[in-house]
Image (tube, rainbow, N blue to C red):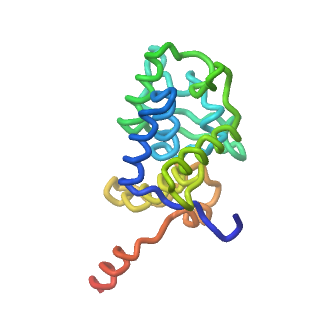
Amino acid sequence: MPGRQAKVISPTMLAAMLRCVARHYWPARSRVIVLLSVKAGLRAGEIAKLEWPMVLGPNGKVADSLVVEDRIAKKGSGRRIPLHPDLKQALIDLRGEGQGNGPVIVSRRGGPMTPNSIVNWFVSLFAELEFEGCSSHSGRRTFVTQAARLTHKAGGSLRDVQLLAGHRSIETTQAYIDGDSDAQRRLIGLL
């Protein structure tokens, strides 16, 4: 879709997504897929290839951050991403269902999912919810946009967002950030 970007997921849309996946065949796995996208900014290929050792600490428990190893990241752009509390709890819940070795996200048959199967999973979810303009990249775009808007509150900069996203250039990160017309109006009002 040249010239078009995936739609950003609003908090209301995310709540609807999480309610919907709670009714899925495997709700714990589905919740992790959504949160890996929206709360960690992972690409479909990274979600498919993420393995338990990348989210577990030395004690064998879910760590406070996940490691996207270079071998699963686009262009070898591995990185460490602190875990959002909701994502950490979802990973703990999924691991409690007997997961703990191999891929974090497995198919119904027990094997690893492919990046394309993750893309198709999101296509089905968004179709079920009738969310037009959303794709498997919507969660990642949402993550980058929200991080960029909130980075000043954490004492960070756009460079921190770039590193979390695994982008090689700041221009790529900037292209992900969705504008906010209400914020633009407030900004002009402050001038």
Which residue: 71% across, 67% down? 2
Q: Position of residue 190 (x, y in %)?
A: 27, 82
How many numbered dots are placed on residues in this image?
Answer: 0
Can you tell which quarter of the image residue 50 is in?
Answer: top right
Work out whether residue 125 or residue 147 is closer to the camera in this orientation and state it: 125
Q: Position of residue 187 (x, y in %)?
A: 33, 79
Q: Position of residue 115 (x, y in %)?
A: 69, 39
* Direction from residue 168 to residue 148 in the image, left or right: left
Which residue: 68% across, 38% down? 117
Can you tell which quarter of the image residue 104 is in?
Answer: top right
Can you tell which quarter of the image residue 63 is in?
Answer: top left
Does 79 appear above or below 173? above
Q: In which quarter of the image is the N terminus?
A: bottom right
Which residue: 48% across, 60% down? 158
* Direction from residue 119 to residue 148 in the image, left or right: left
* Direction from residue 172 to residue 146 in the image, left or right: left
Instruction: Determine if residue 154 is in view.
Output: yes
